[in-house]
Amino acid sequence: MESVLYQATIFLMAAVIAVPIAARLGLGSVLGYLAAGILIGPVFGLVGTSETEDILHFAEFGVVMMLFLIGLELDPRALWAMRDKLIGLGGLQIGLTGGAVIVVSMAFGLPLNTSIAVGMIFALSSTAIVLQTLSEKGLMQTGGGRSAFSVLLTQDIAVIPMLAVLPLFALPELLAIASDGSIQKPGGGEAKQALSLVEGLPGWGVTLVTIGAVAVIVIGGMYLTRPVFRFIHAARLPEMYTALALLIVVGIALLMELVGLSPALGTFLAGVLLANSEFRHELESDIEPFKGLLLGLFFITVGAQINFQVLARAPTQILGLAFGIIALKAAILFLLGRAFGLRHRDLWLFTLSLAQAGEFGFVLISFSSQQNVLPNWAAERLLLVIALTMLITPLLFILYDLLSKHAGDSNDTPAPAEDEIDERGPVIIAGIGRFGQIVNRLVRSAGFQTVVLDHDIRTIENMRRFGVKGFFGDPTRPEMLHAAGLGDAHVLVVALDNPEAALKLVTYARRERPDLHIVARARDRAHVFRLYQAGANDIVREMFDSSLRAGRYVLENMGLSEYEAARAEQIFYKHDRYSVQELAQLWRADIPSAQNDAYVRRARELESELEARLLAQDEEKDEQHP
């Protein structure tokens, strides 16, 4: 027990220290987990190799859960709509990269079976690092970002057949044949007998049982899920949902093992079948914490098992392989990107973001070693190479930033042509998302003409289907604003969801039209202050009014009359507007609000004033109704 508690303490402590630091540095959680494993293993020696191997068998279940969640995210109809990029761009990337790595591996003297496994391993990129970085940098909706996402999605799906076929490439020299004809791992000793539904069956029997197991998963996912969830719902116990979610994943994984298939294959299939289910979000929320912890544990154990003595013995070879893999993948990605119409910034983003090896490579290496496809010496080197390419990834994104600056704005992938604005109106609405739509409907319903601008072509097209005319283009561009009638407009509504873009638009519009009335959408109070300083007249926090209404409903249900609740709401509203104006004079962009003593002092005074006003209302009510 003491050993188990010691290991748990070391692993958890390493994770909670290293992962937040890596996230703050922009390196991503995967690199944080790997760094934690490296620290407790090779660096400080807090855990041994045998201990990490035992934990790895348990942690690998995090991979099974991850594939189940990936399946839940893959709506079959969405996959069909993306079939061109998934099969074309993604399929070619995996095929060409894998084929090139196989050729190079055989040139270095590796046998064909091992070379095929190495080709599969290096055909994959880091989904966790790339998607997180693209989201943080706001690049997901660019042409290069969407293409990279398509390739990553194809790679995630491709892991399933890779895990299924890898055992077919086991090396004979890594296997030992027992006297009874059974296959054992070298090193002697009797293997522990595993449960199996296909042992001793003829070939046709194995096929029938395997098909039957897959059919059970398909039929269960389609017809049994709803009745079971309704039965669990009747218990009114939230923990039962978590138990059911775990039972689905563990049960399917066990069934797949009993018929000799990859557990990941079955859970992925079940996830896809449940992607359209009304219970999808419940399953995701229940499984996600277990997946995150187990997957993190998996990466920590991988980091702890990395043998840096191998790097010390052959640093030139390992580093050469790491940079060689990046260069080879980048060359193939560059050619594919050009063939599929990517240019300039988008081409560089697509090329550099996917040039590393990925976390699924660790999964395939671990699985290949267990299945006797990779010898230990090769697995050690490949683990190091993958880890190094992932550590280099932030540098690749820095290189992309440098190339983007030299490329210039004119070098982006050609976007849909902006509309020619042929209307003018007294009200210009910049941004027609959830916020702007309500404003536009109200103003137009009252009989006033509006000119709507938005940078999302799909939003504009959807509006036109409902008979609402809008113009596609970047509302922050001066020529777009002037074409929409900025010089003559009475009101400009800034409803953009990007705070920086909104601030840029308000600043420009106020400079061009000191007399223009600007109504701006703000994300939070700090954004309010920045817009106030930029010159906005009326600033609306996007959730403020809806939150006030919700608070009024709470007061009504706590015993206040409708009038009393509405009165409290009105007092709060007026006082908050006054507070914002007061605090805007003290707010400073270069100091966090909590460290601005004058701001904090005035905020506390204003809060006390609000409490006093609301208390005075209560006392007035008591006097009127003794």
Image: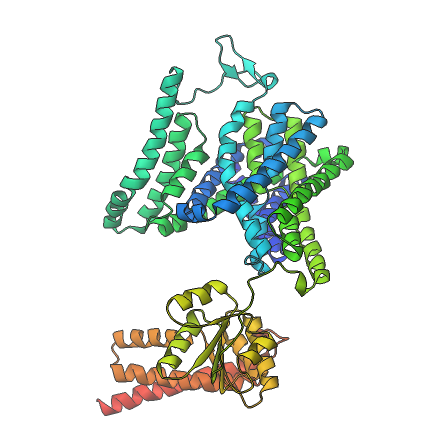
Residue 358 left/right relative to 183 = right
Instruction: Work out whether residue 427 or residue 461 is closer to the camera in this orientation and state it.
Output: 461
In the picture as drawn, the residue positioned furthest to the left comes out as 626
Residue 118 left/right relative to 278 = right
395 up-or-down from 3: above or below: below
Q: Position of residue 592 (x, y in %)?
A: 59, 73
Instruction: Work out whether residue 406 or residue 1 is closer to the camera in this orientation and state it.
Output: 406
Q: Residue at x 30, y 41 (%)?
A: 222
Q: Position of residue 40 (x, y in %)?
A: 62, 42
Instruction: Work out whether residue 178 or residue 278 is closer to the camera in this orientation and state it.
Output: 278
Residue 196 left/right relative to 21 = left
User: Considering the image in quadrants, where does the C terminus appear?
Assistant: bottom left
Q: Which of the 4 image quarters holds residue 385?
A: top right
In the picture as drawn, the residue positioned furthest to the right comes out as 316
Residue 108 left/right relative to 97 = right
The answer, for residue 602, to whether it is visible in the render is yes
Q: Residue at x 39, y 74 (%)?
A: 438
Q: Position of residue 380 (x, y in %)?
A: 65, 32
In the picture as drawn, the residue positioned furthest to the top comes out as 179
The answer, for residue 197, to whether it is visible in the render is no
Labels in figure, total: 0
463 up-or-down from 177: above or below: below
Q: Residue at x 34, y 36 (%)?
A: 218
Colour convention of the picture: rainbow
